[in-house]
Amino acid sequence: MNRLADETSPYLRQHADNPVDWYPWGEEAFTRARELDRPVLLSVGYAACHWCHVMAHESFEDPGAAAVVNELFVAIKVDREERPDVDAVYMQAIQALAGHGGWPMTVFLTPDGHPFFGGTYYPPERRAGLPSFVQVCRAVHEAWTERRQGVIDQAAELTGLLARTSAIEARGEAPDLGVVDAAVAELTQRFDPAWGGFGEAPKFPQPDLVELVLRAHVRTGDPDQLTTVATTLDAMASGGIYDHLGGGFHRYAVDAEWLVPHFEKMLYDQAGRARLYLHAHQVTGEPRWLQVASETIDYVRRDLAHPGGGFFSAEDADSEGEEGRFYLWDQDDVAGCCGDDAEEALAWWGLTPDGNFEGRTILNRPVRGDLVRPPEIERCRRVLLEARGQRVRPGLDDKVLCEWNAMFLATLAEAAAATGREDWRADAVRSGEFLLAELRDDRGRWLRSWQDGRARHPAFAADHAALLGAFLALAQATGQARWITEARAVADALLDRFGDPDRGGVFTTAHDGPALVTRAKDLVDNVIPSANGAAAVGLLRLGALTGDDHYHEAAQGILRLVAEPMRHHPTAFAHTLAAVELAAGGPVEVAVVGDRPDLVVAVQERFLPGVVLAWGEPYPSPLFEGRDEGLAYVCRGRACQAPTGEVGELTAQLTG
């Protein structure tokens, strides 16, 4: 047994019995590498990664391959979800070396941590133009022992590149709505009118890109923009990427039609996609999109919930050694479960004798967008879900990640407020209280990861930014002033410990955090918003709610920092563009003073991306000062409209 058995990461513990002499990331491993004068073999993956498991089985569990690794290297295994800082730095190096990246990630480092060679998956035998894993190991060893100076020069060049990309400086003013319009225009060119989404297969749902178009529609009323959103949402929810029995989304589709997914389910995907479908429902009133949002939220509450209030990270793609096995059906399975309703069920979910995936069927809706189930199909769904529950479930990654939990908490709180679901509101509060109780150390500093009663790894900027959004969502969903207090505390910690007072923005790691070969900034939005993008949105909203210009200025610093790259690549900043929109118009401030739930609901039930809402327990803020109870106040640019106690008038002020 190696050194991974006591780690909090299920992914690392999966490798505890490998014959590879793994170390977790830390100084012990690098000290050993310097003592032995050996390179470090860094392997980065995560628990729900199919090809990570394949490479582990083929190479890391093989005694012969492990013997080569143990002889030539000091081996470090990293869970990218626990250590996104490590993953981000070395992924950038791999992308520079190979032109692409992915997981599993295999990187060779000098004993002081500088990367000099690497790639992603390597097979056990040479195939498809790839050398075998052992061949790569021996070639790297030969370079290290016989061409050391070349290796050191390569490492220095790569490290310099990493340092340059993390040291960009603000140039000029913050971007305006022109860059938002440019992003929407680019997405229009990339839009797939047949199946929705942007680009070709494989297709990754990108909630922030779709929501960018949805916000543009709300702002402009352009019907083509709504068509882009509707086509994408209906195609995704009709395809096999959506779990038609249990709710929730698989990670991505390998085809353009969203039919065949890569079957893992990630918590962050549920957070972003449920939020998107909720917002689309708020804009249009379409019940099918509320159904998708509700089923996705309830999937997480049912299958990823820790009893204490947190949420687990992911479910694997594989069960019983086969990818997707848990989710596949054939005609006899469905007919036997659904009885008299079998014929309707077979047609509803597209079951055919030949299936659509290796002889079996991934349930989907052949009639795209027809998602609201009639009673007989709903009965079948429940029976099939119960029958599926008797199967061997995919593996569960039961660590609780601060950032991902905060993302889902924000979605859950917003959905509770929009729909009036008190069970969701109660779960959102429990989740917030779990994070406060379990994900902070004795000094009150936030931690990244919790598992089975143990929390570890200092939290990153992304964790703080996501927490800021979550606490603001809780404050606006519950009217409890304590969540504004927590939002201010986490925002202050983010700026004090991660902020760059010289160039603007926030670093990934804290000033007093563990050092890597370079100190990076997370600027580009992906499926998970960047730390800087999420921070900019949260700081603008917090500044509007509290009247503290310090937060507004910090957000402006982030926008100035990304202004130049954003102008060249606007769609790479989809989440950050929400901050551009907020800053351009200034958040619309709404205060409902006193006990007026009807006025509060009138705000909460609508998709109002530029609005912040203060209500319930007063807290230090100009929004509550000198205001009469029983009235709502709507203010733009620090100029307020006439207060009103009428729902209709409030709605007119919000939407006019």
Image (cartoon, grey):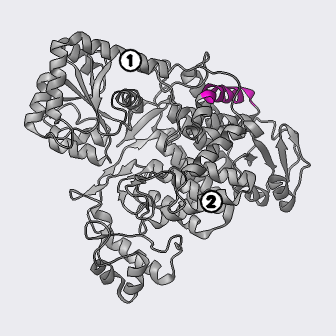
Instruction: Name the one closer to the observer, 304 or 191.
Output: 191
Q: Secondary structure at mark 1?
A: helix
The numbered mark at residue 159 is: 1
The span shown in magenta is 548-564
Question: Which is more N-terminal, label 1 or label 2?
Answer: 1
Label 1, residues with CA under 10 Å away: few <14, some 14-19, many ≥20: many
Look at the image and tell me in which quarter the N terminus lies. top left
The image shows residue 153, relative to residue 630, as above or below, that is above
Looking at this view, name the residue that lies furthest to the top: 149
User: x%, y% of residue 102?
Assistant: 35, 39
Residue 563 falls within the magenta-colored stretch: yes
Residue at image position (59%, 41%) is 575
Q: Is residue 69 left or right of residue 213?
A: left
Q: Secondary structure at mark 2?
A: helix
User: x%, y% of residue 229?
Assistant: 60, 58
Q: Is residue 420 visible?
A: no
Q: For mark 2, what is the residue? A: 280
Q: Is residue 400 left or right of residue 216?
A: left
Instruction: Name the one closer to the observer, 131 or 218.
Output: 131
Residue 174 falls within the magenta-colored stretch: no
Q: Which image quadrant for residue 131?
A: top left
Q: For the residue marked with disc 2, what is the amino acid? A: Ala
Label 2, residues with CA under 10 Å away: few <14, some 14-19, many ≥20: many
Residue at image position (17%, 42%) is 127
Looking at this view, name the residue that lies furthest to the bottom: 340
Q: Is residue 68 left or right of residue 16?
A: left
Q: For the residue marked with disc 1, what is the amino acid? A: Thr
Residue at image position (74%, 57%) is 221
User: x%, y% of residue 509?
Assistant: 47, 24
The numbered mark at residue 320 is: none
Instruction: Name the one closer to the observer, 36 or 259.
Output: 259
Q: Is residue 124 left or right of residue 443?
A: left
